[in-house]
Amino acid sequence: MAAPSSLENLIEALRCLPGVGPKSAQRMAYHLLQRDRPGAQRLMEALQQALRVLRHCQRCNTFTEAEICDRCLSPRRDPSLLCVVETTIDLNMMEQTQAYSGLYYVLMGRVSPLDGIGPRELHLDRLLARVSDGLVREVILATNFTNEGEVTAHTLGEMLKSRGFKVSRIARGVPVGGELEYVDAGTLAQAVRERKSLYN
Amino acid sequence: MAAPSSLENLIEALRCLPGVGPKSAQRMAYHLLQRDRPGAQRLMEALQQALRVLRHCQRCNTFTEAEICDRCLSPRRDPSLLCVVETTIDLNMMEQTQAYSGLYYVLMGRVSPLDGIGPRELHLDRLLARVSDGLVREVILATNFTNEGEVTAHTLGEMLKSRGFKVSRIARGVPVGGELEYVDAGTLAQAVRERKSLYN
């Protein structure tokens, strides 16, 4: 008396979503079928459409429907700055700051030896080709401050420095609004080590 | 410099899933596109298939690919017992107990005056038609012990009793393995009120 196979398939397929285990997948499937069939239909069509039209920008590697994305084509962007981020979500976070007007390169991942992801799997040759356009003067590494993000930044830093590029890393320190009492010791130690001199 | 519209659509469409807000929807969309396109493809096809072939069993109202589901057609099920549950998930929970061999009726909801869901919206006339097949001798109400579940059980109980059906409600009490110290007062009070005499 198992569930119908198309229902089982749907529950199983929903598990490809991050953070969705067997229980949530079941709940999602029944929710869609029982209470939101139009939503299920929209989701199906959105997936179909996204899989069909979305590809990677030839320049910055983010998702776009065109050969090259609007941002890379924009004349209002400073082509001498290239900020390297791990994911499109990180790119969006950077954009929200409105503190950066250069261009981007999205790695779509990070160096992670434990997962077998090295420079080759990340296609760092494409990043190298990108920075060699004759316009880029500084590469800003904005990978995460996790172990893997740091390894990625180190790998990229060495690679770019050896080819004569100016490379920088976004600053680490106490968050804005952060109280020393609640900041972890590692962050505080870094903030001391990387202190900035005032009135110079 | 907004995200491509097919990406925006996908993020928006993912929000029809229960418990998925804007942040998770974004994470899911990027995960699918960046790391699991085959998974996205499978999900799209599973949705398409489920929407196409799944319908409600004419007898028990659960999801099935046929006119009448396997369970309702099974000769090994006792047709004199009909257990009413709110959702297919609840039905699955009942089945897992292996303590019940009768048939089911799935309400696909609950009476919820605040949400404008009354007996009519729940199509209780279909349940009435179902129990009037001449075989059902007892209707077991297994709706949740939430406010809405209790209102549903009360509504169904009155309706069925007035038509001469034998109606019962699954037992309430301290959970198996439960310690009195950690059980809430309401449950404990019910357990005392509904105590069973031993050695009778």
Image: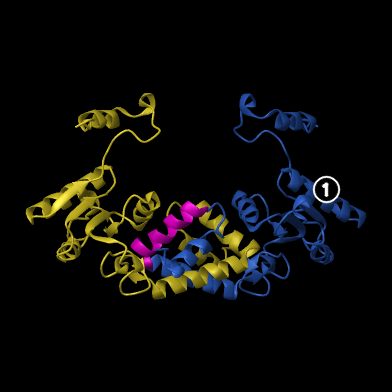
Chain colours: A yellow, B blue
- Image coordinates of residue B46 in percent, x first then y, are 50, 70
What secondary structure is found at the residue carrying circle 1?
helix
* Quarter of the image where one finds residue B195: top right
* Quarter assignment of residue B40: bottom left
Numbered range of the magenta stretch: B21-37
The C terminus of chain B lies in which quarter of the figure? top right
Q: Image height check: is B48 above or below B82? A: below
How far across and how far down the image is residue A97, in percent? 38, 49
> In this rendering, is residue A26 above or below B191?
below
Residue drawn at (77%, 56%), measured in percent from left and top? B117
Whether residue A4 can be seen here: no
**Which residue is at a point 75% across and 47% down the rendered structure image?**
B148
Considering depth in this image, is A51 or B197 the residue closer to the camera?
Answer: A51
Which residue has dot 1 on it? B154
Residue count near mark 1 (Cα–Cα under 10 Å), binned few <14, some 14–19, many ≥20: some
The residue at the point 78 percent across, 56 percent down is B116
Camera-side residue of B198 and A154: A154
Specify the amino acid type for callout 1. His
Residue A132, placed above or below residue B66 = above
Q: Position of residue B136 (x, y in %)?
A: 81, 60
Task: Tell me if residue A127 comes above or below residue B192 in the rendering.
Answer: below
Chain of the residue that carries numbered disc 1 in the rendered image: B
Q: Is residue B22 magenta?
A: yes
Answer left or right for B64 relative to A160.
right
